[in-house]
Amino acid sequence: MMLPFTGTYAALGTAIDNGFKLYVQEQGGRLGGREIEYFVVDDESDPSKATDNVNKLINRDKVDVIVGGSTTGATMAAVPLVEQAGVPFISLAGAVVIVEPVKKWVFKTPHTEQSTGDEDLSAIDVAMAACAAPAYFPSVRIGDTLYADGGLFATAPDQVALHEAEHFFGVPPERVTMLSVGTATDSYQPADSADEDDGAIGWLSDGRLILTLISVQQQHVEAMMEDRLGDRYLHLDAPWPREAGLGIDVATEQAAATLVALGKATVAEADFTRLAQFM
């Protein structure tokens, strides 16, 4: 067994070890009619240790089967070794990439309920639902559910990406390096300054309220990511051009040209020494 008994996921490794051994004990200490002998290595929640651990289990301990790899990183580091050695490997991690494309000696436990739910949907339905931005395209109905663009809550998806990497793929935040590319909304300001007596009409005109919410969301997410990832997070963005006529539902040729020019200027002004660390 290759499990994390130290490091970030030590508690998970201990729980898996106890649960597996309890199940075997309930089967009379035998599986498939054969008595079980355990050889255990600690992957320390560090995928870089997987190579040494798998080699120990295969070459030193001569195991028949390896169970473990509780994170996708540790699993994927072990895959080439078990495939070459012809030793069955049952991974406990969740990523589909572990078994797709199909491998001869690598298997995985089923997804948890948190990782399933849309596997029966067609690719076109998923694509249409993901593009159902109310300002551009209508919402999309799939079955009894009406979908709108996730950008309504994740215009700045940095935190969502980190959460999915950490929660679903078992990647600890200290192993994440993130390059974030904005759309100038970080520094959004309405063309006309806000007044104390601006009501609903004033705030809803020209998309001011929506763009303000998007800007605040971007700033909030950026601050959180800088706190969580430190120097391993880089956000590239351009200053908002107040007089350029940009907006959430503005898709004119002039707006596109403005955005392209802003992007080129942002890259030209970037610190390439630091940017190279994220490429």
Image: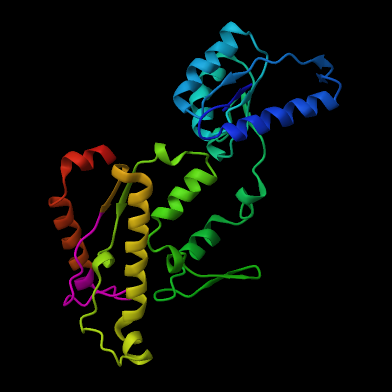
- Residue shown at 73% from the left, 31% from the top: 19
Residue 131 seen in this snapshot: no
Which of 138/76 is in front?
A: 76
Residue 74 rendering spot, x and y as whole percentages: 51, 28
Q: Which residues are magenta?
A: 236-255
Residue 215 rendering spot, x and y as whole percentages: 32, 68
Horizontal relation, residue 55 to residue 272: left or right = right
Kindly report the secondary structure that dominates the magenta region of the rendered protein: loop
Residue 95 seen in this snapshot: yes
Horizontal relation, residue 90 to residue 29: left or right = left
248 part of magenta stretch: yes
Task: Name the image quarter holding residue 252.
Answer: bottom left
Q: Say how the picture is coloured.
A: rainbow
Residue 11 rendering spot, x and y as whole percentages: 60, 34
Say above or below: 266 vs 91.
Answer: below
Q: Is the N terminus in the top left, top right, bottom left or bottom right quadrant?
A: top right
- Residue shown at 59% from the left, 11% from the top: 58
Task: Name the image quarter holding residue 29.
Answer: top right
Residue 172 rendering spot, x and y as whole percentages: 46, 39
Say above or below: 111 vs 86.
Answer: below
Say above or below: 76 vs 201.
Answer: above
206 part of magenta stretch: no
Which of 223/156 is in front?
A: 223
- Residue shown at 64% from the left, 30% from the top: 14
